[in-house]
Image (tube, rainbow, N blue to C red):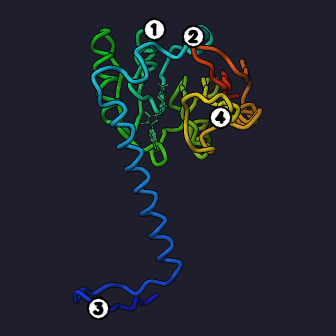
Amino acid sequence: MPIDWRWDRRQRLLPVLAPHHRRAIHGVERGLESLRNDRKRWNERFGGRGFALGREPNPFLKKYLRYLPRGKTLDIASGEGRNAVFLAEQGFDVEAIDLSEKGLKKTRQLARDLGVRVRTIQADLDKYPIEGGRYDLIANLYFLRRSLLPRLKRGLRRGGKIVFETYTLEHRTLGVEGPKQAKYFLKPNELLRLFKDFRVLFYREGIFREGGKKKAIASLIAEKI
Ligand SMILES: C[S@@+](CC[C@H](N)C(=O)[O-])C[C@H]1O[C@@H](n2cnc3c(N)ncnc32)[C@H](O)[C@@H]1O
């Protein structure tokens, strides 16, 4: 289709855009802006001297470690690496992906301190091409991107497992720290339904006390069949 051109007030030649093109460009710009904001926010959170999320692994991951295959592992939205480094210490071969370079720097620091190796990848998970059938284990802890799930499932080999834990909507009634937007919370039984095409080996949902804090969460371990 031919493009029409116009001069703007500063004598720049610009394409004349149809409303649907303008909406598409606006959408892309908004997406980029929200990505930049997320990255900035997490970099600020992880930019201090200490570990904002602690150095100790997620208690659910630690407790059920024996059900997880020690193989090629992907920790998505790995933060400062508490879980990725713990898995590496336990003999898993770990790749950690996160948007925040400050978080990944902390991950490398923690791995060095504990004498293990973790491959860190700075990427936007909304775009990152996860290789099909590559992983024995994927860890998805405290990150909820429903649109990513088909790619995570494809990324697992048959018999591979996913370990998943994050907040449920009930968390908002507890008046404690947590995500701001409703889309980042699981609905009742949602996590179970999201993995109905997998063999669910463990599931729990409710309010639990961990590290002296109350949390409303759902936790799952499921196997690709
Ligand atoms: C609540 S933290 C969870 C960290 C880690 N899983 C843990 O349990 O310690 C959420 C993480 O998601 C990352 N994140 C947010 N949006 C992302 C995106 N689009 N791509 C990759 N990582 C992202 C943030 O940088 C942050 O490290």
- The image shows residue 177, relative to residue 34, as above or below, that is above
Q: Position of residue 218 (x, y in %)?
A: 68, 26
Element class at badge 1: loop
- Res 78 label: none
Asked whether disc 2 touches disc 1, contact meaning CB atoms under 8 Å apart, the reply is: yes
Element class at badge 2: helix
Question: What amino acid is at disc 3?
Answer: Trp
Residue linked to disc 1: 90
In terms of depth relative to the viewer, which is nearer, 106 or 225? 106
Element class at badge 4: helix
Residue linked to disc 3: 7
* Residue neighbourhood size for the residue with mark 4, other residues' Cα within 10 Å, grouped as few (<14), some (14–19), many (≥20): some
The mark nearer the N terminus, 1 or 4, is 1
* Residue neighbourhood size for the residue with mark 2, other residues' Cα within 10 Å, grouped as few (<14), some (14–19), many (≥20): some
- In which image quadrant can residue 30 be found? bottom left
Q: How many marks?
A: 4
Q: Position of residue 182 (x, y in %)?
A: 63, 44
Q: Residue at x 57, y 42 (%)?
A: 145
Question: What amino acid is at disc 4?
Answer: Arg
105 on left or right of 72: left
Residue linked to disc 4: 172
* Alpha carbon distance from label 4 to label 2: 29 Å
Residue linked to disc 2: 65
Asked whether disc 4 touches disc 2, contact meaning CB atoms under 8 Å apart, the reply is: no
* Alpha carbon distance from label 2 to label 3: 64 Å
- The image shows residue 156, relative to residue 34, as above or below, that is above
